[in-house]
Amino acid sequence: MVILGIESSCDETAVAIVRDGRELVSNVVASSMDQHVIYGGVVPEIAARSHIEVIIPTVDEALRQADMTWDDIDGIAVTYGAGLGGSLLIGVVTARTLALTFGKPLYPVNHVEAHVYANFLTVSDVPAVSARSEQPAFPMLAIIVSGGHSQLALFQDHGTYELLGQTQDDAIGEAFDKVAKILGLPYPGGPSIAKAAQEGDAYAYSLPKAKMSGEYDFSFSGLKTAVLRLAQQLIGEDFTFPSFKLAERLTEKQKVDIAASFQRIAIETIVGKALLAYERYAPASVVIAGGVAASQELRRQLLESLPSPIEFPDFKLCTDNGAMVATRACFPLKTADPFSLDINPNLSM
Ligand code: KG4
Ligand code: ZN
């Protein structure tokens, strides 16, 4: 089964072709990130306009790189939620039109679930992307960490899972992005905090870990506020000092130390809960998914803490891509009516 997957939930317009839920045949990602950097975050209107401009060329390029025509494609998968309404709409309308035009089944894919499926690719024909050596086994513990989600889920099978816990406020990626803003580091915050943290002392400052009522739940909003208060205190100002003026008053040393300390604590929060779930449920495999799965600190702490060996997805498959969407649709999934599939910006797992 050969599936063409379309992802457009945020600022990446991404299309990929996957065979049998294992083999990545082509993978094209066009990002409008460079247009959002000056605003310090994704601007929905700019993202949607960019999707309109590049989505058809991106589909064509995925087919070209795969050396395939529509005759070779068995189905079209598309992210229909969660995400930005305007962005999702471009992908869904494109997929519906292509499904009708070429007479292909249409598979509606949940974005967060899709992130998990980046872990099922075991063959890559795409030179810049490597794949895992084997598919994860069930029951599978999924650590889902992205800009919009922080969840621990236990998958018994494809499409059958239990949400063990989740963030009660900000997602972990969102916390990276907000702390980066306080420190005057560029968007997206994950990579720029990771870079700054390399120069810093991860034990320079102690920051709080929230106590949650749900055993596997987390919170990142308090940690972000603690960073804000720490920065205000370091420059000798009180809590009324505006966050956007902090970066210019902090020294380089203070910034890298805050970045390293924040990164350590944020990742420890996730890894601590994942370890609890691992001990309780004894899963046959553990996977990480979402943009923050690209974090080297997360990989380091997981390797150090989890008793079982863990394979990580290629960095290019951690952030948004069409491959994960296509892969999800290679496993049992209900098709949608191409005349009526609608977006669901608030879709949950
Ligand atoms: O999954 P994703 O591409 O988009 C969403 O579905 O949200 O995740 C984007 C998030 C951003 O918040 C970004 O700061 C974070 O992933 N991120 C990282 C790293 N690379 C990207 N966070 C920590 N460390 C990284 N190396
Ligand atoms: Zn994502």
Image: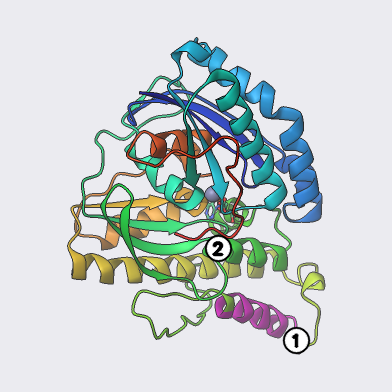
- Residue 132 to residue 309: above or below: above
Numbered circle sitting on residue 15: none
- Relative placement, left or right, of 76 versus 24 is right
Do the CB atoms of the residues marked 2 and 1 lie less than 8 Å apart?
Answer: no
The local secondary structure at tag 1 comes to loop
Q: Secondary structure at mark 2?
A: loop
Q: Residues within 10 Å of mark 2 (few under 14, many from 20)?
A: many
Q: Give residue 236's mark.
A: 1
Q: Is residue 237 magenta?
A: yes
Q: What is the magenta range?
A: 222-238
Left or right: 93, with 77 as reference point: right
Q: Amino acid under label 2? A: Gly
Image quarter for residue 231?
bottom right
Residue depicted at x 66% and y 83%: 229
Q: Is mark 1 within 8 Å of ligand 1?
A: no
Q: Residue furthest bottom?
A: 238
x%, y% of residue 257? 58, 68
Q: How is the image coloured?
A: rainbow
- Please give the name of the residue rendered at 56% of the width and 51% of the height, measured from the top-left corner: 81
